Image: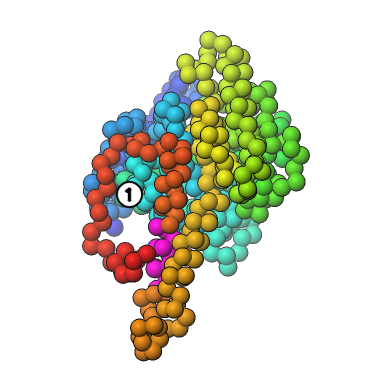
Amino acid sequence: MKIATSVVSAFITGTICANAFVAPHNVPSPAFAKAKSGVVTITHVALKSMSGELDIPCEDDCALESYPKLPASVHPGVNTGQAMLDLLNHAKENGYAIPAVNCVSSSSINTCLEAARKNDAPIIIQFSSGGSQFYAGKDLDNTNYNAAIAGAISGAFHVRTLAEQYGVPVILHTDHCSKKLLPWVDGLVAASERYFESHGEPLFSSHMIDLSEEPIEENIEICKNYLERMSKIGMLLEMELGITGGEEDGVNNEDVDIEDLYSKPEEIYQVYEELSKVSDMFTIAAAFGNVHGVYSPGNVKLEPDILNRAQEYITEKLGDAAPEDKKPVMFVFHGGSGSDISDIRRAIDFGVIKMNIDTDTQWSYWEGIKNFEAKWRDYLQTQIGNPDGADKPNKKYYDPRETLRSAELNTVARLEKCFEDLKCQGVCGMEAKKPAKNVFGPALGGLPV
């Protein structure tokens, strides 16, 4: 294995106005630096791509420097800093949102990458604390969130290694982090800081801090502290304002006061104003009736107009400093499963650039396994013996790759609907993917799944 180890040291004196890092795909670049005034010392440079670092073949889609329809800074693999901001701004300016899918295994990560390439689109891959622990293994001790930290880091390297191979732009994110879980994110930010030392960019693209259950002043103050630390290395902060109802990953908000499910424009402006004093590298998950989980139609009452009123209110406050599109805030949509398509589209019109997806892909993954079992049930009861004969082996049916691949294909199909709903198809401008060659094993060459 050949690893690129060249590190360039540079010293920059004076005021630096740059506020985000660009990590090109195949060429070194200056490191991220940010300071409001004074002296900043930089001792980092971005290395080549992950494929170049590990000496993995990188051809076709993987070798792209950029995409025909995306900003030049956006590249295959994990995007951080300015490239990430350019991608998110492109989504806002062009009226689409990027699916953000919770992953718990290498299989679910690969499914996301496959779906993104099929839809010619970027994707956000994210880990929850529970998903991170599962990625590490449920038998691994999680005292001080050690297993969750290790699992998320392991998943991050998996994403970094394979995202380039699939040729898709990825934002690598972590999901809800309540106050009690802050040590988990602390461990991940520290890992990104160490990664930055040798690579000139963070390991992760962004993290979410969810202090929506805390007083708003405390929420803002803690988020400002994290944003100050994270933005120095080109990381983005997602903060939650107001509470997303329902239950997700062990966090139960099913009984919260209904008023907490709807953010006020004044509160959103308060967050925007305070975080902007630190950096522009943040998004806001404002509450507009969002609920985790899936419910019968009519049981979830979304109010996307809350986002529009907030954009108008903040635009008025900013005056001449407001952006031309009059949408100063990049919003995030949580709890969208089962939402009416018209509500989703209106939320996008009002500045939503990211929509979380978990409940629907959990079901699609399970449904793929369920359908496979139903179709081949008579071949899955014993190791030997099936309708074709009492002495016929069943190994090719119970090979775990068969059921996992069935789950993956079913989820790729479900994610295609998500990309369509979010108007996030054909965004990159790549040619149709060439069929895979030299494929081993039963998953793509054995049973028709």
Image height check: is 13 above or below 408?
above
> In which quadrant is the N terminus drawn?
bottom left
Residue at the spot 44% in from the left edge and 33% down from the top edge: 96
Q: Would residue 407 be counted in the magenta stretch?
A: yes
Q: Can residue 145 be seen at all in this image of the molecule? A: yes
Image height check: is 248 above or below 244?
below
Q: Position of residue 390 (x, y in %)?
A: 38, 89
Q: Position of residue 75 (x, y in %)?
A: 33, 38
Q: Position of residue 119 (x, y in %)?
A: 36, 44
Q: Which residue is mark 1?
A: 166
State which quadrant residue 308 falls in: top right
Would residue 91 appear left or right of 275 to someone viewing this image?
Answer: left
Q: Is 72 or 228 nearer to us in this picture?
A: 72
For label 1, count other residues whose C-alpha is less than 10 Å away and answer few (under 14), some (14-19) or many (20+): many
Q: Can residue 273 be seen at all in this image of the molecule? A: no
* Residue range highlighted in magenta: 399-409
> In which quadrant is the C terminus drawn?
bottom left
Residue at the spot 53% in from the left edge and 56% down from the top edge: 363
Residue at the spot 75% in from the left edge and 46% down from the top edge: 255
Residue type, numbered disc 1: Tyr
Residue at the spot 46% in from the left edge and 75% down from the top edge: 377
Q: Is 8 or 399 nearer to us in this picture?
A: 399
Q: Would residue 162 be counted in the magenta stretch?
A: no
Secondary-structure class at tag 1: helix
